Amino acid sequence: MSEDRQKQILWVVRAALVVAILVTVSFPSWEQFEGKGMLFRAPFYLLPLAVVPTIWTLRGRPAPYPYAVDALVIAPFLLDTLGNVFGFYNNYAVTDDVLHFVNWVLLIAGVTIALRRTDMGRLNAWTTAYGLGGLAIIWWEFAEYIVQELGTAGLGLTYGDTIGDLLLSSTGGAVGAALVIALGERNRSSADALAGGSVQV
């Protein structure tokens, strides 16, 4: 995918998250937002907008800018917010399970791409990304527990739900990391084959 297309996708994702968050804080009385702590979530869900630009700047702004990484880090927070905006969590019980898996595929795919931009090898990148995905879901579940303890009644957290979320998200992270590495190797093999072919000609 071209750099321009990646940039366009990133700005669409960024704008969509901001708009979705504005909807949640502007209409907190909507049924799909009741008991979800959306006002509490809003500032934290906007933090991912600054994560990649900040890290990129601290690393000396290596070129090119990681547009795909930025979009993939933001995407899970967008999908989770849209799941509430459109009432999927209220109307479809499977939504939480699906998004725990899909969101971690996206998030850890972004992390893996970032790791592969360094000199880190494939196995080290996969294990590091997988481990970070595991830590991310542990802290996510802890944050949800704190939000519930502060009086948010609509999360419906149970022991079984937490264990399921830990398994689904960590597995999604493993899959996301593996996909990035596999696709990266396939692209590299294709590029090598093309280069070899041009040499032979």
Image: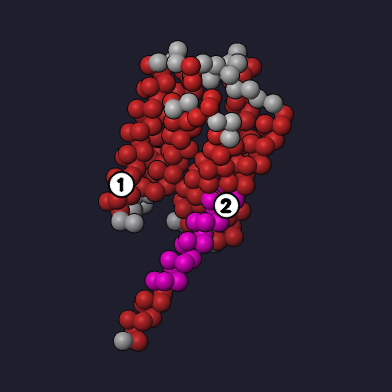
Q: Which mark is residue 7?
A: 1
Q: Is residue 32 magenta?
A: no
Residues in magenta? 173-191
In the rendered image, the residue lying farthest to the bottom is: 200
Image point (41%, 71%), residue name: 190
- Helix, strand or loop at disc 1? helix
**Closer-to-camera residue (29/73):** 29
Q: Is residue 21 left or right of residue 149?
A: left
- Helix, strand or loop at disc 2? helix
Image point (55%, 56%), residue name: 178
Q: Is residue 38 left or right of residue 141?
A: left
Q: Is residue 34 left or right of residue 151?
A: left
Give percent across and percent down for residue 79.
46, 35
Q: How many marks?
A: 2
Give percent across and percent down for residue 1.
34, 56
Kind of residue indicated by mark 1: Lys
| Residue 103 vertical placement versus 23 (above, below) | below
